[in-house]
Amino acid sequence: MTTPPLTWLYVPGDRPLVVAKALAAGADVVVVDLEDAVAPDRKEYARSATAELLSCPQPVPVHVRVNALDGPLAADDLAAVAALPGLSGLRLAKVTSPEQIVRTARGAAPVAGGAPALYALLESALAVERAHAIASAHPALRGIALGEADLRADLGVREEAGLDWCRSRIVVAARAAGLPPPSQSVHPDIRDLEGLAASCARGRTLGFLGRAAIHPRQLPIIERAYLPTAREIEEAETIVKAATTQQGAQALPNGRFIDAAVVATAHRTLSLAHRNEK
């Protein structure tokens, strides 16, 4: 069973030294950003520096967040990095329609010999409304996630709870499309580690798995929040053992009823618990 990443570390594409440090920071995936983290007059440099980095394989998976697909920069971003051996995925900013996914997959495939893994960022009300259509648009799409800063601005939302419906919406859309659970959007205050932990706990209850980060100090907080607790591991082991010795639905000695869905969840829990042993 393949375990999805838990940590995605964003780093500006126009700062090669910072990118080099990020590659050694312990994130499951490093996301080199060509979009919001890069000033307009640095876009071309960020693109060329990222292409140079990805000209050879990297020690950890590297994704590139390209500029908005409906803008003037995305085509050059995609042409510069889509075929490079160090690229593991493309994160597509401000996606609003399934057609954008299809066009990107088809456009990248002839260059790379097959479309690279695509990840769609939904950052507007329109994108959230079309979440399932986007999530099921093309086999090359491997995941969706919210871009909450832009979504907040679009909706005029100020409080955390105001985004909960949108968060649940993309969790359901991802799973309905057969995609992994989405990762949470970034926590913007890099000093607020308690707030980050609380937000991760909330995200976990909503069905998210893992989170994007903007500073290495956030990584262990995210990983700890999303790894199973000792009690959850013990319970999962009990369920799997019971299912091994007796097929079908049954009640455990503690009175808990288990069936195939509960057993599948237990297997996922154990796979996540042992992710660092693989």
Image: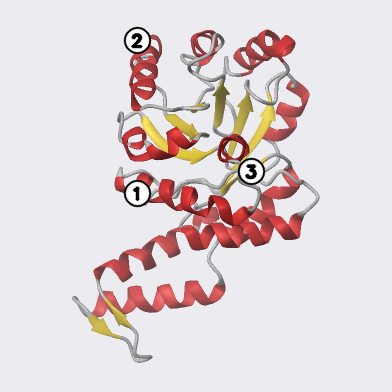
| Residue 247 tag number | none
Whichever of labels 3 and 1 marks the residue nearer the N terminus, that label is 1
Nearest the eye: 165 or 274 = 165
Find the distance from the CA under tag 2 to the CA under tag 3.
Answer: 33 Å
From the top left corner, tell me how far across and down residue 9 is, in percent.
64, 38
Nearest the eye: 161 or 112 = 161
Circle 3 residue: 186
Whichever of labels 2 and 1 marks the residue nearer the N terminus, that label is 2
Locate residue 262: give its quadrant. bottom left
Locate residue 239: give its quadrant. bottom left
Q: Tell me the residue at 34%/90% (across/down).
A: 255
Find the distance from the CA under tag 2 to the CA under tag 1.
Answer: 29 Å
Going by the image, does 255 lie left or right of 192? Answer: left
SS state under label 2: helix
- Tag in front: 2 or 3: 3
Whichever of labels 2 and 3 marks the residue nearer the N terminus, that label is 2
Is residue 269 positioned above or below 234 on the image?
above
Locate residue 252: give its quadrant. bottom left
Q: Tell me the residue at 40%/46% (across/down).
A: 180
Circle 1 residue: 175
- Tag in front: 2 or 1: 1
From the top left corner, tell me how far across and down residue 59 is, in percent.
60, 32
Q: Name the residue type under label 2.
A: Pro
Circle 2 residue: 110
